[in-house]
Image (cartoon, rainbow, N blue to C red):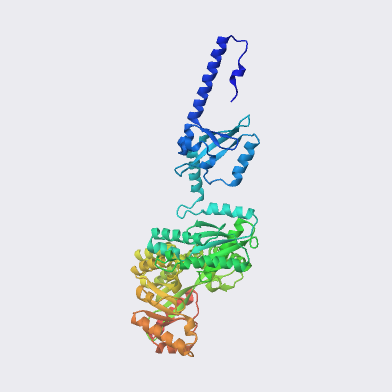
């Protein structure tokens, strides 16, 4: 401190001089007491050995004075700062300059505390005085806000915001790496069937499993829902990158902690490489997502690296979805009706409603040419709503006109069942008396009962069945469903896929399969429709096998509503003859 006595006027009388000296000494004592009360003070020699501390230092650190004096500040080092931090500090004060910053220390009890620190070199070079103020509450508040903004509360992993920030840092380092998006297969089914608590536990277990499989320098974060991001600081050689990704998949598939969730847990991973696939965060995420889509389409439980054709396919899908939206607005979409006739019995004819798209160039396309759009739930639901509206209106018109038909079947998608409005609309029509329940049939496919939306499908089927709506199993035999579905679900009609009908007259195996399906269905009181019947010989053979109904070009292709009505009148006349 400055020698304040040197400022005294030497011409003052001795008594006045003594009084002034006492005042200055008293002021110095007050200043020191005020500093001790407010600040954490320590004095060290030139080597950094502590020579004195005040009571506040002892209080916050948990050490007694005798434990601190003679030690260095390493006694409270927390490990939160790197070597460069302290090198800058020592370089500054060794040059005689004042250093100021915030330091995290560790108390004797093990907890951390933060101090705003000013280190002042002594003018005589004898050492340093450190004056600190406790800023732990402010720092903890800052950390809390930072965690809220950057950390996923369920898994403790970096959240989407932080992942994108870390991705930007990795790009700035200009070192090659692999960005992967990991999606837990069928997570929604587990979440819906077992409950959100189990779903949360599954996500936490997946996070722990993948974290354990990561290497030093890798990053794992949660993007949201059941999607995780991985940044692998690895050689981006395709084969080595693929091995790293497949190792993550293998870890999930074999982790004992993940085997207790009722079904085999697996994941799909899509990945893009920096800088070969993309040079900025947005494009990397987009291309990893394209690869993820390919992994899911490829059967799930696998990893795919981005390839240029994936971008072309994604652009084509996006263009098709946009064109579908325009087509629905421009009334380019329409519905045709294909007859379903009985064999050997006298019953009114039924129909299946089939979607068609008349393009601006007058080319008419079937859903087979734009089937990818049904992977998008929103687009699928909009198409389903359009078809349902057309069919409900057609049923009313035919009823008003007295057209003799039995029912109209419509093909449902996962998008229809995930959008509750589809089932709600049918139920409302039945409850209001505007629709006879036996005049509408909803067709589902086997794959819908195995996807992650299976629970929603089953619940929807139960609601429809409770109103008397018929449920048909379409394309039976081409999927992976077990026969248990025929026993568990209220199926009223099974439709044998045309791939089994094409060679039924020539292929003994196909004939045996078709006969077995018919016999089994009849034992369960389920009607059978054979699809794709194009030849008289096929129809005759199906009659001998006791198939209930046939559908195909032998009878008629899909036709407009007026032609379908004439077909129904003609069938009724033939039955009456």
Q: Among all residues in the image, which is located at the extreme top?
A: 13
Q: Position of residue 260 (x, y in %)?
A: 40, 65
Would residue 493 be visible to someone looking at this image?
Answer: yes
Q: Quadrant of the C terminus?
A: bottom left
Q: Position of residue 447 (x, y in %)?
A: 45, 72
Q: Position of residue 276 (x, y in %)?
A: 65, 62
Instruction: Pick whichever, 547 or 220, lies toward us.
Output: 220
Residue at 59% x, 46% y is: 83
Instruction: Pick whichever, 64 or 482, lies toward us.
Output: 64
Q: Is residue 272 above or below residue 336?
A: above
Q: Is residue 241 above or below residue 559?
A: above
Instruction: Pick whichever, 151 or 115, lies toward us.
Output: 115
Counting labels gives: 0
Residue at 53% x, 19% y is: 25
Q: Quadrant of the N terminus?
A: top right
Q: Position of residue 491 (x, y in %)?
A: 37, 75
Q: Is residue 422 left or right of residue 95?
A: left
Instruction: Pick whichever, 548 or 261, lies toward us.
Output: 261
Would residue 386 be visible to someone looking at this image?
Answer: no
Q: Is residue 394 above or below residue 542?
A: above
């Amino acid at each position: 401190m400055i020698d304040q006595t040197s400022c005294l006027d030497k011409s003052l009388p001795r008594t006045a001089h003594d009084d002034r000296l006492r005042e200055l000494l008293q002021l110095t004592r007050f200043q020191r007491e005020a500093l001790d009360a407010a600040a954490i003070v320590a004095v060290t020699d030139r080597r950094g050995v502590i020579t004195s501390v005040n009571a506040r230092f002892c209080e916050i650190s948990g050490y007694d004075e005798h434990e601190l004096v003679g030690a260095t500040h390493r006694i409270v080092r927390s490990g939160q700062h790197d070597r460069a931090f302290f090198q800058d500090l020592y370089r500054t004060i060794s040059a005689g300059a004042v250093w100021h910053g915030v330091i995290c220390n560790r108390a004797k009890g093990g907890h951390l505390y933060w101090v705003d620190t000013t280190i002042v070199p002594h003018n005589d070079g004898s050492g340093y005085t450190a004056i600190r103020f406790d800023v732990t509450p402010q720092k903890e508040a800052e950390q809390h806000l930072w965690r809220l903004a950057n950390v996923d509360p369920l898994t403790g992993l970096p959240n989407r915001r932080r992942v994108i920030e870390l991705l930007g840092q990795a790009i700035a380092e200009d070192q090659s790496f692999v960005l992967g998006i990991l999606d837990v297969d069928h997570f929604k089914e587990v979440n819906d069937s077992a409950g959100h608590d189990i779903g949360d536990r599954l996500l936490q277990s997946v996070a722990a499993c993948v974290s354990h499989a990561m290497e030093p320098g890798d990053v794992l974060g949660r993007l949201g829902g059941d999607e995780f991001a991985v940044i692998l600081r690895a050689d981006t050689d395709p084969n080595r990158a693929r091995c790293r990704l497949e190792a993550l998949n293998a870890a999930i598939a074999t982790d004992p902690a993940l085997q207790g969730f009722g079904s085999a847990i697996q994941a799909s991973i899509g990945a893009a490489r920096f800088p070969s696939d993309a040079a900025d965060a947005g494009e990397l995420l987009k291309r990893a997502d394209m690869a993820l889509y390919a992994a899911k389409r490829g059967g799930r439980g696998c990893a795919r690296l981005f390839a240029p054709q994936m971008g072309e396919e994604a652009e084509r899908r996006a263009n098709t979805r946009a064109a579908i939206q325009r087509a629905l607005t421009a009334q380019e979409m329409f519905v045709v009706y294909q007859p379903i006739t009985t064999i050997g019995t006298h019953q009114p004819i039924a129909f299946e409603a089939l979607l068609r798209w008349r393009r601006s160039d007058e080319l008419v396309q079937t859903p087979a040419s734009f089937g990818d759009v049904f992977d998008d739930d929103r687009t699928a639901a909009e198409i389903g709503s359009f078809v349902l509206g057309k069919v409900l209106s057609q049923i009313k018109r035919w009823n008003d006109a007295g057209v003799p038909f039995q029912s109209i079947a419509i093909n449902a998608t996962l998008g229809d069942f995930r959008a509750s409005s589809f089932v709600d609309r049918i139920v409302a029509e039945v409850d209001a008396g505007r629709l006879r329940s036996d005049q509408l049939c909803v067709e589902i496919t086997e794959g819908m009962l195995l996807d992650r939306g299976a629970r929603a499908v089953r619940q929807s089927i139960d609601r429809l069945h409770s109103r008397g709506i018929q449920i048909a199993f379409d394309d039976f035999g081409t999927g992976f469903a077990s026969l248990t579905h025929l026993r568990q679900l209220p199926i009223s009609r099974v439709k044998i896929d045309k791939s089994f009908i094409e060679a039924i007259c020539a292929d003994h195996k196909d004939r045996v399969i078709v006969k077995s399906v018919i016999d089994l269905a009849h034992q369960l009181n389920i009607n059978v429709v054979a699809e794709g019947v194009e030849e008289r010989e096929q129809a005759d053979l199906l009659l001998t096998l006791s198939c209930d109904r046939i559908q195909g070009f032998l009878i008629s292709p899909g036709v407009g509503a007026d032609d379908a009505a004439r077909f129904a009148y003609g069938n009724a006349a033939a039955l009456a003859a």
